[in-house]
Image: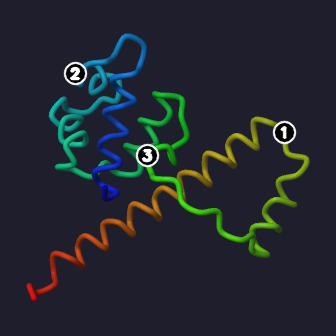
């Protein structure tokens, strides 16, 4: 399953499992987007922007990274260790904000990578 299909399936799954289930119309109203936008996200016709994924994550009370397949844990690099040291001693609400920001940046990066790969595949001549 490609990333676009994974994101689409995850949006649909979260919507359907929200309480008694949530209609596309109701979700669209909550997010202040057109109903057909939610439908297109769920069918993989449209890529949701990282801002849209952030809105979805906040609405469903999940991490924005929930929309992406899990990837292997990379080895900790020096700059990650430095970031962790800097985060020590922050208040819980500041840590939460830092976590959400890091997740948002990671999601933005992964979405941009996937779009670039898709564009590159479309641009290649058939063999």
Frontmost of labels 3 and 1 is 3
The quarter in which the C terminus is drawn is: bottom left
C-alpha span from label 1 to label 2? 38 Å
Q: Which residue is mark 1?
A: 91
SS state under label 2: helix
Q: Which residue is mark 3?
A: 67
Q: Which residue is mark 2?
A: 25
Residue drawn 25% across and 19% down? 23
Callout 2 environment at 10 Å: few (<14), some (14 to 19), or many (20+)?
some
Asked whether disc 2 touches disc 3, contact meaning CB atoms under 8 Å apart, the reply is: no
Residue drawn 79% across and 75% down? 78
SS state under label 1: loop
Q: Is residue 61 left or right of residue 99?
A: left
Frontmost of labels 2 and 3 is 3
Asked whether disc 1 touches disc 2, contact meaning CB atoms under 8 Å apart, the reply is: no
C-alpha span from label 2 to label 3? 20 Å
């Amino acid at each position: 399953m490609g990333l676009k299909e994974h994101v689409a399936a995850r949006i649909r799954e979260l919507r359907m499992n929200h309480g008694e289930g949530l209609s596309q119309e109701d979700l669209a109203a909550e997010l202040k987007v057109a109903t057909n936008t939610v439908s297109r996200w769920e069918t993989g016709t449209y890529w949701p922007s990282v801002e849209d994924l952030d809105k979805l994550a906040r609405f469903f009370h999940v991490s924005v990274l929930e929309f992406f397949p899990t990837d292997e844990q990379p080895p900790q690099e020096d700059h990650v260790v430095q970031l962790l040291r800097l985060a020590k001693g922050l208040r819980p609400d500041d840590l939460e904000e830092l976590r959400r920001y890091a997740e948002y940046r990671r999601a933005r990066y992964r979405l941009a990578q996937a779009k670039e790969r898709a564009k590159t595949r479309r641009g290649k001549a058939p063999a």
